[in-house]
Amino acid sequence: QVQLVESGGGLVQAGGSLRLSCAASGRTFRSYDVGWFRQAPGKERDFVGAIWWSDGSTDYADSVKGRFTISRDNAKNTVYLQMNSLKPEDTAVYYCAAGRYRSNYRYTSGYNYWGQGTQVTVSS
């Protein structure tokens, strides 16, 4: 079992930065790929990015590429989402998720465990 807790959300002006954290419990966490998703009101939960447990490789949605960076600290059982140059359209609840279905990593079906989400609001 893996439990995930996100933190670090808040209100920021356009152009600003935030760093979200995803803290995990469970000794097997470091063997899971971790994805970040976001969900705006009335919209589906969309892929933001992911990081592989095996070599730390990452991939991102086109909408955030070059602005967001995912990293992980296996010693702390924590994954981070650094968000720079934030835009109002980045406003959403952000979720981290852990899974082992790499072929589906861009989809919610690729993950077994989810955090409760943290709100990010970007004002214009």
Image: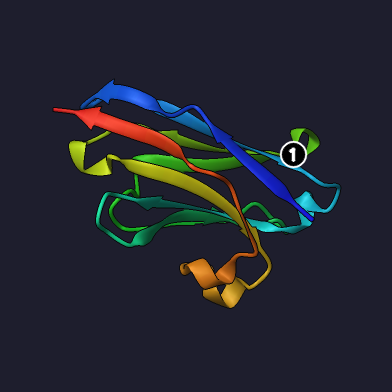
Q: Position of residue 72 (x, y in %)?
A: 65, 41
Determine which residue is flagged by label 1.
77
Q: Position of residue 81 (x, y in %)?
A: 49, 38
Which amino acid does the dot numbered 1 rest on? Answer: Asn
Q: Quadrant of the N terminus?
A: bottom right
Q: Is residue 40 left or right of residue 51?
A: left
Is residue 120 positioned above or below 51 on the image?
above
Q: Is residue 15 left or right of residue 101?
A: left
Residue 17 in view: no
Q: Is residue 109 left or right of residue 120?
A: right
Give me the residue at 43% from left, 44% from top: 94
User: Residue 83: which quarter of the image?
Assistant: top left
The mark total stands at 1
Q: Quadrant of the C terminus?
A: top left
Is residue 38 positioned above or below 108 on the image?
above
Q: Is residue 20 left or right of residue 16?
A: right
Please state which of residues 72 and 108 is positioned toward the viewer in this rendering. 108
